[in-house]
Amino acid sequence: MKYDAVLFDCDGVLVDSEGITNEVLRVMLHERGWSLSPQQCMDIFLGRAVKDQQARIEQHTGQPLTAQWMQQFRDRRDQRLHAELVAIPNALQAVQEIHRDYDGRIACASGADRGKLVLQLNKVGLMPYFEGRIFSGHELPRSKPHPDVYLAAAAALGFAASACAVIEDTTTGARAGLAAGATVLGYCPCGIGHSTAQQFRELGVQQIFTDMEQLAPLLR
């Protein structure tokens, strides 16, 4: 194997959740007076924890970002995810192969809250492959683009992050993996000519792939 372990982001890599979460957030921000298009909302929040954007949200809505509002957001988000969430195409097969190839040395390391991660992995049938190896940026001093969650995941598996592969679909997450010293593989389903792929290259992501079925061979 090329690496000691493989660390997966969740949203956009394992589960097709980003559009669902983004729409719930966009609607709730509109209810508070901040109107964004779907693309504007995605550009601001993709790959980032909502709570980390507190100052920006408060500036545009003129209202405090309360614990009650955050809980309402999570409840509405989770309701939609439970009803609509599906896995990223070919992600289940890729994880099964990589779990086998690496003798279980894989983890899920996300900026999302743990409740969301557990819901999502259970919903799409991926939990058996990540049970006990789920890491949330919410539980660490800093979330992505800081490296904390990837450093924590690698350490828990008993390896240096520099010996691990990180699988990411956003530049925010890629920055986190690179800052941890890991090798980042960028998942870009829109194609290698897409702006995200170009941003990956500018960051120093050497390996970009467009379909999850390509991932297991890349990691061998």
Image (spheres, rainbow, N blue to C red):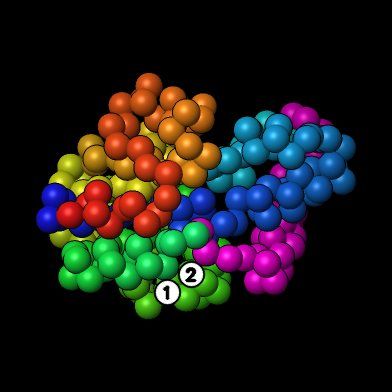
| Residue 204 visible (yes or no) | yes
Main secondary structure type of the part rendered in magenta = helix
Where's the N terminus, which quadrant? Answer: bottom left
- Which residue is drawn at the image coordinates 83% and 35% (left, top)? 35
Q: Is residue 148 above or below residue 113?
A: above
Q: Which residue is mark 2?
A: 121
Question: Quadrant location of residue 174?
Answer: top left
Taking the magenta stretch, the answer to whether it contains residue 208 is no
Which residue appears at 19% of the width and 64% of the height? Answer: 102
Tell me the magenta residue range: 59-88
Label 1 sits on residue: 127
**Res 71 visible:** no
Is 197 on the left or on the right of 81, as rendered? left
Q: Are marks 2 and 1 in contact (CB under 8 Å)?
A: yes
In this view of the protein, which residue sits in the foreground, 172 or 165? 165
Give the CA separation, mark 2 to mark 1. Answer: 5 Å
Other residues around mark 1 within 10 Å, as few (<14) / some (14–19) / many (≥20): some
Task: Count neighbours of disc 2 (C-alpha within 10 A) and say few if under 14, some if 14 to 19, many if 20 or more.
Answer: many
Q: Callout 1, which amino acid?
A: Met
Give the label on residue 176, or none. none
Can you say whether 122 is above or below 111 in the image?
below
Percent of width and height locating residue 61: 81, 35
Q: How many marks?
A: 2
Q: Is residue 213 left or right of residue 119?
A: left
Q: Position of residue 9 (x, y in %)?
A: 41, 52
